[in-house]
Amino acid sequence: MEKNVVFSLSVLVLIAFQSIGQPIASVDKKTKEFFLPPGLKTEYRVFGYQYANAETRKLICFSSHEGDVRANYNQCPLGSYFDTQKMSGEDKIIYLGPAGSFAKMDYITGRGKKTIFYLPSSSFVLK
């Protein structure tokens, strides 16, 4: 009986850890546009960094946490969002290519201003 309980708990822990590491967003292979859908039923927090290094300045945040988004808690200059549909007007994010364990992305405003940032590759899939 005790072995079954330990085994069951181990399986649950493994499933929980795997679901945490699953990609939450996608990049369209044709348009190269980054998309994070609204209404995800999972907790997430993904930062885009100034360079391909998580120790550099955080430029953008995608999060399921109210404080991260509403108050821009991390003071990201490109903003904090629940999903890409909440970004301003015609703003969009374009995938430029791989950069080690990161992806080089281009945040483009509706007025055409571009800002390069780096997103962990594990946070999205190419579709």
Image (tube, rainbow, N blue to C red):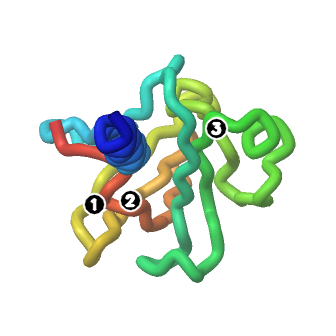
Q: Position of residue 126 (x, y in %)?
A: 19, 44
What residue is shown at x 33% (from left), y 34% (from top)? 1
Q: Nearer the viewer, mark 3 or mark 2?
A: 3
Q: Which residue is mark 2?
A: 105
Q: Nearer the viewer, mark 3 or mark 1?
A: 3
Tell me which amino acid carries mark 2: Met
Residue drawn at 40 percent across, 45 percent down: 13
The residue carrying pointer 3 sits among few (fewer than 14), some (14 to 19) or many (20 or more) residues within 10 Å by Cα, namely many
Q: Is residue 58 left or right of residue 97?
A: right
- In the rendering, at what x and y percent does residue 54 appear? 52, 75
* Residue 83 x/y as whole percent: 54, 31
Above or below — where is 72 with respect to 66?
below
**Which residue is denoted by mark 1 in the rendering?**
96
Give the crowd class for mark 1: few <14, some 14-19, many >=20 residues within 10 Å: some
Q: Nearer the viewer, residue 116 or 53?
A: 53
First in sequence, mark 3 or 1: give its number. Answer: 3
Earlier along the polypeptide chain: callout 3 or callout 2? 3
Task: Tell me, yes or no, whether the two marked residues, 2 and 1, touch with CB atoms within 8 Å.
Answer: yes
Mark nearer the N terminus (2 vs 1): 1
Task: Kindly give the residue lying farthest to the top in the view shown.
Answer: 39
Q: Is residue 18 left or right of residue 110?
A: left
